[in-house]
């Protein structure tokens, strides 16, 4: 088994639906040749050695548009992006 370890203050995210066919609510398939909006959030699965990171493995984060490099490792689609391109962390809160 291979493991991808980020270096140089990079983050690895597991992002659903990086590519591939999508289906509309009415059942029409949209091929991957059509320009689609890429996902802007993902789950952190690895961090490089970053001093005082504000995110941790398992967090869901929002990142900049058109950021990162898509990697296919053992059939799993991953996104490697600079830590600085992470914009926010999505957290669960209680209603008041």
Image: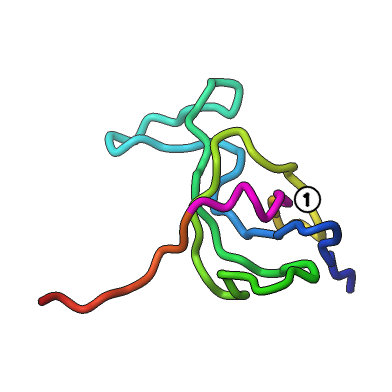
Q: Number of labelled discs?
A: 1
Q: Residue at x 73, y 44 (%)?
A: 70
From what the image shows, is residue 68 above or below residue 93? Answer: above
From what the image shows, is residue 1 above or below residue 69? Answer: below
- Residue 32 quadrant: top right
Q: Residue at x 41, y 37 (%)?
A: 23
Image quarter hosting the N terminus: bottom right
Query: What range of the chain is rendered magenta?
Result: 80-87
**Residue 58 coordinates in the image, percent (x, y):** 56, 75
Which class describes the residues within 10 Å of circle 1: few (<14), some (14-19), or many (20+)? few
**Residue 48 coordinates in the image, percent (x, y):** 78, 67
From what the image shows, is residue 31 above or below residue 21? Answer: above
Q: Residue at x 84, y 57 (%)?
A: 8
**Residue 43 coordinates in the image, percent (x, y):** 56, 64
Outermost residue to the front: 51
The residue identified by callout 1 is 72
Numbered disc 1: secondary structure? strand
Outermost residue to the left: 96
Say if the magenta span includes residue 70: no
Say if the magenta span includes residue 82: yes
Image quarter hosting the C terminus: bottom left
Q: Main secondary structure of the magenta part?
A: strand
């Amino acid at each position: 088994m291979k493991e991808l370890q980020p270096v140089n203050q990079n983050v690895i995210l597991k992002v659903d639906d990086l590519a591939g066919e999508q289906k509309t609510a009415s059942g029409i398939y949209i091929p991957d040749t059509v320009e689609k909006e890429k996902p802007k959030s993902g789950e952190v699965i690895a961090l490089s050695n970053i001093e005082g990171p504000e995110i941790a493995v398992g967090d869901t984060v929002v990142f900049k548009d058109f950021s990162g490099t898509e990697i296919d490792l053992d059939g799993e689609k991953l996104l490697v992006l600079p830590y600085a391109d992470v914009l926010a962390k999505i957290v669960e809160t209680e209603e008041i």
